[in-house]
Image (spheres, rainbow, N blue to C red):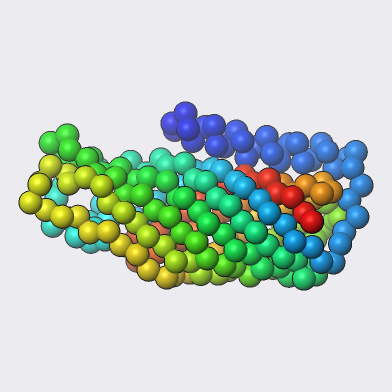
Amino acid sequence: MSNRTLLCVSLSAASLLIASGAQAQTHYEPHERYAYLGLGTGFSSLENDRDEVDNFIESGGRNFSIDDDGNVWKGFAGYQFNRYLAVEAFYADLGRVRLRGTDGASADLESTAYGASVVGQLPVTDWFTPFAKIGAASWETEVRGNLGDTDLTLQDNDGFDPVYGLGAQFNINPILIRAEYERYDFDSDYTIDTFTASVGLRF
């Protein structure tokens, strides 16, 4: 596991510990309706093998290895209609996947996505709320590099596909802290899982 991944895991764990400690000292009064903004970071994992990625970028069957240890950055804005339902808009930089050819050449796949989700919430206490989300994203994956073959143009990709996830939110009025897992289901040949910790502000 790389230092970047260890850092992201540590950030997630620290967020959970901070929230757990703070709730013992902070009384949170739940509100039925509010708007919120947030930022998060974490790491991503590609769920596809070499042959599937080869199909995705149309590389012509070249032999390469995959390094998918990428950092994720995301921003989101939402509105909670009641304690059980919210909607969110989001933008995510999903990091870089590096392909390494046998001759030392490499290509980078860099993905971004933006879209909207419906969030279902189940408040366990005033300060702790598990949630699930489902939505859709417009996404783009840019390919930079040629894997050593200058005559071959690797294909960029884009589309509009589902996004879904699970997480937990800690409410420390007016701050919210989240830990969550999301799957960006771009293509049968290219699916990205993300694990993030986020901090937000309720209005």
Hey, which residue is sitting farthest front in the picture? 203
Hey, which residue is sitting farthest top in the picture? 3
Query: Total marks drawn?
Result: 0
How far from the left and from the top, in percent, is residue 189?
31, 62
For image coordinates 12% across by 42% down, the residue present is 148
For image coordinates 30% across by 62% down, the residue present is 157
How far from the left and from the top, in percent, is residue 166?
61, 59
Quadrant, the N terminus: top left
Classify residue 82 by image quadrant. bottom right
For image coordinates 89% across by 42% down, the residue present is 26
How far from the left and from the top, in percent, is residue 193?
47, 53
Hey, which residue is sitting farthest left in the picture? 151
Quadrant, the C terminus: bottom right
For image coordinates 66% across by 51% down, the residue present is 38
How far from the left and from the top, in percent, is residue 190?
35, 59
Q: In this view, does 124 lie to the left or right of 160?
A: right
Q: Is residue 56 left or right of residue 105?
A: right
- Looking at the image, residue 97 lies above or below residue 37: above
Residue 179 visible in the current orientation: no
Residue 126 visible in the current orientation: yes
- Looking at the image, residue 13 lies above or below residue 161: above
- Looking at the image, residue 156 lies above or below residue 120: above
